[in-house]
Image: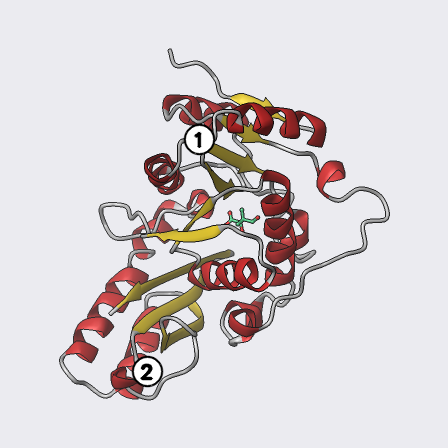
Amino acid sequence: MPRSPAVARTLPSLRRALGDLRARRATVALVPTMGALHDGHIKLVQHAKRRASKVVVSIFVNPTQFAPHEDFGSYPRTWKADLAKLAAERVDLVWNPGVGTMYPPNFATRILPEGPATENLEDRFRPHFFGGVATVVGKLFTQCRPDIAVFGQKDYQQLKVVTRMAADLDLGVKVIGVPTVRERDGLAMSSRNVYLTPEQRAVAPVLHRTMKEAAKRLRNGDDLKAVIADGGRTIESAGFTLDYFEARHAETLAPILSIQDGPVRLLVAAKIGTTRLIDNIGI
Ligand code: PAF
């Protein structure tokens, strides 16, 4: 059985462990996660291993990116299984701080991103979210000082927000986005998929199917407004409550009027029952 990776839970132990890792001029990759690791996370780790000589995975369910009515309390926590998966990938270090380490008493500083964080996508429905993400990822970057950091493209707006923040704050880390890993029927892997009932799980791939169909029509020259409206109706008639289904500029996330304004990314967020799913594809 592969050996469990070293685990740091306090800042002094993190510094010691990173000092050891860097002793031989290693390059360090960080994969930030909230645990409940699935094959999508493992792809990030494998990508990190190809790009750097040492890999650190952080596992921290970050309270500041959840609104009070959201699922912070019930978010899946699967520590033992996570550690076994990271051992199998021969990860070098797991950074697993407690809430009191990340947010000690009297903590009073936040990073409030603009630009990609304010493009009326996720931010319209989760206004607290990117402030929480930018603050915790900013802290993870300054704590771990990685050379590269690896994120999934599944959270596409988050990837753009973090990339902008790392550049704006001169954090000296190269942010890399890795393509979404999907189930065989197209559903994007997500730690929240465990919330789906069997009936909802059967319907969930509609999101990916609809985006693929929309991308095909757009490539064939169909009118963007009509394609997006049809896609939204398909998703709603499958039983989802639609938050958004939009075509945006793939780099800036700004709204576009036609695919000539691209490169184009289709982004969707919709609720089935109480579970909110997000996904996106390039066209
Ligand atoms: O994508 C996630 O799992 C989280 O938003 C992140 C980047 C680990 C920050 O808490």
User: Total number of numbered labels?
Assistant: 2
* Residue count near mark 2 (Cα–Cα under 10 Å), binned few <14, some 14–19, many ≥20: few
Residue 145 falls in which quadrant of the image? top right
Image location (x, y in percent) of residue 159: 46, 58
> Mark 1: which secondary structure?
strand
Compared to 142, does 207 lie above or below?
Answer: below
**Rendered image: mark on residue 104:** none
* Residue at x 55%, y 34% (from the top left corner): 77
> How has the structure been colored for display?
secondary structure
Q: Amino acid at mark 1?
A: Lys
**In the image, is 142 to the left or to the right of 283?**
right
**Rendered image: mark on residue 54:** 1
**In the image, is 132 to the left or to the right of 121?**
right
Compared to 142, does 24 lie above or below?
Answer: above
Q: Quadrant of the C terminus?
A: bottom left
Residue 58 falls in which quadrant of the image? top right
Q: Nearer the viewer, mark 2 or mark 1?
A: 1
Image location (x, y in percent) of residue 264: 30, 74
**Rendered image: mark on residue 229:** 2
